[in-house]
Amino acid sequence: MTVRVRFAPSPTGFMHLGNARTALFNWLYARHMGGQFILRIEDTDRERHTEAAVQVIYDSLKWMGLNWDGPVLRQSERLAIYHEVAQKLIDEGKAYRCNCTREELEAKKEAMKETANHACYDGTCREKNLGPDCGTHVVRFKMPKEGESTFEDMIQGTITKNYKDLDDFIMVRSDGMPTYQFAVVVDDLALQITHVIRGADHIDNTHCQIALYHALGKEPPRFAHAPRIDGLSKRKGSPSVEYYREALGLLPEGLNNYIARLGWSHGDDEIFSMQELIEKFDICDVNRANGEFDEEKLKWVNEQQLRLVPIEEIADHTLERYEKAGIKVEKGEWLYKLLEMMRKRAHSLNEIVSDSLFIWNAPQTYDEASVSKHFNADTPALLEDLANAIQNITDWSETAIEAAFNEIAANRSLKMGKVAQPARTAIVGIAQSPGIYEVVWFVGKDETVRRLHKAAEFIKNR
């Protein structure tokens, strides 16, 4: 059997982190099993659906590297199919029309609450055999009324519920649009889905859907309900893929690695490449316990990935960020060398870019703490001597730059820090940066000399 799984989001907003993990679990299981990952857009909610939200889904999945197999299925293009299946079930006595008004339904629910601990539809129209001319109506599914519904969940184990606690759920709304409970089964059958991997909040839905599979004469797929992610609602900001990509500047490898570990583990291992995740991930290894979201841990995982992924990929992710900062830079050895220097210290892609802007932008002011610590009355002469030594370099290399610094330190009987820190403050604007020889090499000879002289004048005029 070829494993076929699907990710079926509703395009009503951002790609929430919980949805992203569901997509990742499905994709990893499909790739691990040599199967197929299908994308379905559940766009039948006319009030909340937007095409912009559909594009967010596409963009988020592509950024995460979760490529889907075959064309995208959209529920809004399948309305005639849902109506045909609903009519078949009505004809077979497995579904019925219900013309109870909203006010009547609310009154029934309130009455049931007084005699039971749940409020289900009381079946007023269940045996009326109403026709299509019964006025405004919905179509309900006839749930069994006796016995139990049981299924074996690949994560949660055996799950059982009494049929008397389950509703005759609505299949088709009064406006003709199918409900989630109905359309999901029709579509999963059409797509030949073998495994349904989704969040634990769908467990109760599963009993109704299994009953619908049986009513259609079909065997249901296997189900796996992943535990919730706790802590997302407690944080500020939007817990969406877009937020972590743009605002936090994460790598897709960083986000994927972290959310894969929210519910799944492989020994004590923390850091995985995407290929390692594919090789090691099995949905049966997902825990039942809820995952606890920790943004600091997410940032730490991203830092590890930042140092591991190929530098060409880092370049792909930073080009647009440099452009937004007003910097035009192209992929190539110069950029790769810059990114190698910056990623050793950075926590995110945003930090790589922001902390490297000193190469193009000379400091307009100097960090006061750095000035107090590293600038004094002797510093102007030191910076001017260093500027002259750098100006005389004929072979522009880090080795030659280091020799110039060593020369000044030796001539003045200073430790290297007493030369490097004033120079770093003069060139970058603050006494924290990558290695000073690398910094000077990237800034360039003429610009370095200019900045050293400018800082010397700044000190003299203080």
Image (cartoon, rainbow, N blue to C red):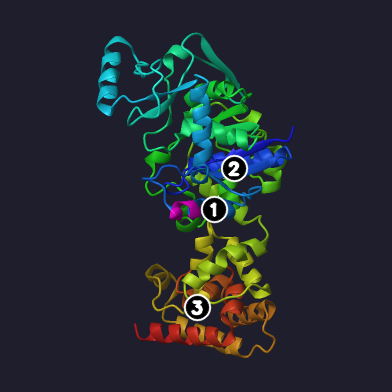
Q: Which span of residues is magenta-colored? A: 51-55
**The residue under label 1 is which amino acid type?**
Tyr
Crowding at dot 3, Cα within 10 Å, few <14 / some 14-19 / many 20+, comes out as many
The disc placed on residue 427 is 3
Residue 128, x across and y down, in percent = 38, 17
Compared to residue 151, the image places residue 333 above or below, namely below
**Mark 1 or mark 3: which is in front?**
1
Sequence-wise, which precedes: disc 2 or disc 1? Answer: 2
For the stretch drawn in magenta, the main secondary structure is helix
Whole-percent x and y of residue 338?
Answer: 61, 70
The reply to whether the magenta stretch includes residue 102 is: no
Q: Residue at x 58, y 45 (%)?
A: 39
Residue at the (46%, 47%) spot, across then down:
11
| Residue at which label 1 appears | 58
Q: Amino acid at mark 3?
A: Ile
Local crowd at mark 1 within 10 Å, few (<14), some, or many (≥20)? some
Residue sitting nearer the eye, 207 or 327: 207
